């Protein structure tokens, strides 16, 4: 049918043109021979293709189709709206110098994530991407010349100052893993890339005095994202209220747990990353058994695992580029997902610190992503296999954290229970921080200070979060709002289905449809269009 063909065309194009990100969920498997292209010609072509695909989508008449097909139609509309959001509204490609650090170096980083061996094809692609870095950063200069934002430029310069030499260190460590032909040429390719990065850093420093303040996306553009991309049925005012209410609930719950466990001793750290990985493997099996035995979520033997592994020497220097997870991809969906970890120590960043003491804190969130995307890639409907927006995916993982806390998973680990609730504070606070960054009520520095003090959390993580959220409005609030949507869907399903409701069946379906915005899941599962209609009303 026309919709299926259009969706297939869209995703073939999207996979080749999707911006790279430090986030793990949006990562895609690029076509053979792919190289990033952000030239003015490529951007103009993106606009032309988007207009053509959007026009064809508008012409589709799905009014007589089953709800499932109409949901697929709205899914494609959400995906097309996201491209418009990226190209025309947040415009990272012409405002944010850090955007081009990701576009030039993240493709290399992503190729380092799958475990060895490094065959000839992967080695050749890494070499080609290194030699392509100067071109991408030249495109950056062209695109940023008129509209680059001073706060993003300062952040980019600060980042490149902090990580200077990391590319050279990573590639030097990679040489022994490559076929001889590519091992021999890697130093020259690395030199080309590293010199281009240094020159980009110098160019940004020269430009800084002439750059203007950050331009927030503003209320109209934020509303476009909330209601046309994420299909959220809540106004900005309502989102603030939801976030504040959850903040108070999390603070109160944490106070109770800290009082309850005030005399509990601190847990021991693993001796090193090897022991950390061994503990995690046992923990992951135990968490799966717990979920199955408590009737929470099916854990079939065929479902791949989520494993920790010591971070390789060629990956560690570049871990600042993104989440150190290899969630795999559709052609590797049966392989175990991997999270690379360092030797545990008390000064690790916020999330890594918690996982070092108890890997279950990562298993019930990042491990959920690994399961959910693997299940999604096996969906019999291609339209449901891809990432659309963070709210359902992050909402599911955040929901699972609290679900497992309530079910008793952390009854034997007071510090972990407290961390789970403290992370609830963080996710609640992100809602208001996200909105205020998007509306220009907070600077990046102010947002970082607020996160560091109010959660509290380490300054490094707080700064990284603030910069990422400023460049990607709407992502930070997706955790909390997505979870509340999941809980709303669960509660409504209990009421609507009565004796026919089964918690495990509900969660199994939720994981399978985990890429679908929750307003659409509500319509398909329960026949209720109220949330979708409200999103449409708010979109205007």
Image (cartoon, rainbow, N blue to C red):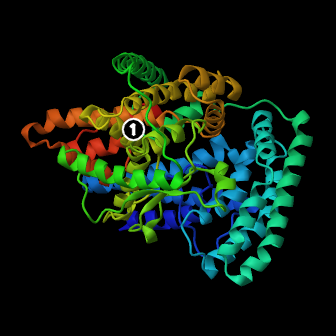
The quarter of the picture where residue 460 lies is top right
Question: Relative to 501, is 227 on the left or the right?
Answer: right
Residue 259 coordinates in the image, percent (x, y): 37, 15
Residue 29 seen in this snapshot? yes
What residue appears at the point 63 percent right and 33 percent down from the top-left corner? 466
Check disc 1 and report its element: helix, strand or loop: helix
The quarter of the picture where residue 312 lies is bottom right
Residue 234 coordinates in the image, percent (x, y): 41, 28
Q: Nearer the viewer, residue 181 or 284?
A: 284
Question: Relative to 120, is 241 on the left or the right?
Answer: left
What residue appears at the point 19 percent right and 37 percent down from the top-left corner? 493
Looking at the picture, does residue 263 appear above or below residue 457? above
Question: Relative to 35, is 255 on the left or the right?
Answer: left
Q: How many marks?
A: 1
Residue 530 seen in this snapshot? no
Tell me the quadrant of the picture where the N terminus can be found.
Answer: bottom left
Question: Relative to 4, is 99 on the left or the right?
Answer: right
Looking at the picture, does residue 485 appear above or below residue 283? above
How crowded pointer 1 is (Cα within 10 Å; few <14, some 14-19, many 20+) is rated as: many
Residue 237 coordinates in the image, percent (x, y): 47, 20
Instruction: Report the residue marked by disc 1.
Output: 398
Residue 318 coordinates in the image, percent (x, y): 68, 54
């Amino acid at each position: 049918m026309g919709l299926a063909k259009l969706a297939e065309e869209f995703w073939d194009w999207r996979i080749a043109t999707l911006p790279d990100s430090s986030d793990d969920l949006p990562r895609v498997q690029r076509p053979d021979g792919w190289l990033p292209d952000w030239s003015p010609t490529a951007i103009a072509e993106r606009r032309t293709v988007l207009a053509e695909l959007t026009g064809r989508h508008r012409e589709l008449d799905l009014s007589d189709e089953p709800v499932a097909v109409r949901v697929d139609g709205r899914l494609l509309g959400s995906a097309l709206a996201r491209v418009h959001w990226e190209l025309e509204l947040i415009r990272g490609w012409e405002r944010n110098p850090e955007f081009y650090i990701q576009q030039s170096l993240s493709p290399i980083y992503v190729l380092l994530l799958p475990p060895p061996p490094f065959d000839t094809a992967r080695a050749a692609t890494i070499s080609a991407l290194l030699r392509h870095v100067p071109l991408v950063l030249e495109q950056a200069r062209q695109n940023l010349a008129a509209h680059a934002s001073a706060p993003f430029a300062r952040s980019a310069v600060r980042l490149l100052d902090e990580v200077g030499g990391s590319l050279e260190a990573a590639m030097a460590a990679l040489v022994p893993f490559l076929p001889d032909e590519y091992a021999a040429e890697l130093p020259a390719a690395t030199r080309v890339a590293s010199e281009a990065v240094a020159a980009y850093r110098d160019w940004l420093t020269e430009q800084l005095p002439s750059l203007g303040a950050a331009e927030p996306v503003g209320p109209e553009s934020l509303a476009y994202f909330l209601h046309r991309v994420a299909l959220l049925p809540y106004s900005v005012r309502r989102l603030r209220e939801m976030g504040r209410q959850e903040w108070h609930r999390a603070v109160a719950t944490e106070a109770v747990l800290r009082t309850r466990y005030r005399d509990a001793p601190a847990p021991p750290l693993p001796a090193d990353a090897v022991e950390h990985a061994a503990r995690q493997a046992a923990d992951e099996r135990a968490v799966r058994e717990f979920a199955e035995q408590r009737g929470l979520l099916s854990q079939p033997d065929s479902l791949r695992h989520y494993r920790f592994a010591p971070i390789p020497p060629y990956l560690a220097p570049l871990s600042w580029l993104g989440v150190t997870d290899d969630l795999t991809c559709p052609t590797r969906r049966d392989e175990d997902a991997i999270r690379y970890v360092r030797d545990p120590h008390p000064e690790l960043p916020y999330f890594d610190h918690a996982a070092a003491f108890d890997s279950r804190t990562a298993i019930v969130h990042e491990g959920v992503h690994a399961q959910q995307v693997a299940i999604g890639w096996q969906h019999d409907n291609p339209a449901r296999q891809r990432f659309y927006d963070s709210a359902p995916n992050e909402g599911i993982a955040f929901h699972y954290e609290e679900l497992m806390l309530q079910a008793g998973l952390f009854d034997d680990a007071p510090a972990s229970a407290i961390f789970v609730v403290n992370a609830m504070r963080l996710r609640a606070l992100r809602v208001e921080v996200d909105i205020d960054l998007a509306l220009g009520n907070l600077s990046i520095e102010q947002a970082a200070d607020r996160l560091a003090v109010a959660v509290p959390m380490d300054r490094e993580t707080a700064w990284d979060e603030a910069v990422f959220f400023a460049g990607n409005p709407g992502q930070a609030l997706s955790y909390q709002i997505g979870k509340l949507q999941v809980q709303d869907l669960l509660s409504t399903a209990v009421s609507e289905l009565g004796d026919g409701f089964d918690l495990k069946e509900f969660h199994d379906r939720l994981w399978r449809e985990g890429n679908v915005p929750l307003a659409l899941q509500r319509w398909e599962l329960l026949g209720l269009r109220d949330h979708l209609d409200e999103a449409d009303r708010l979109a205007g």
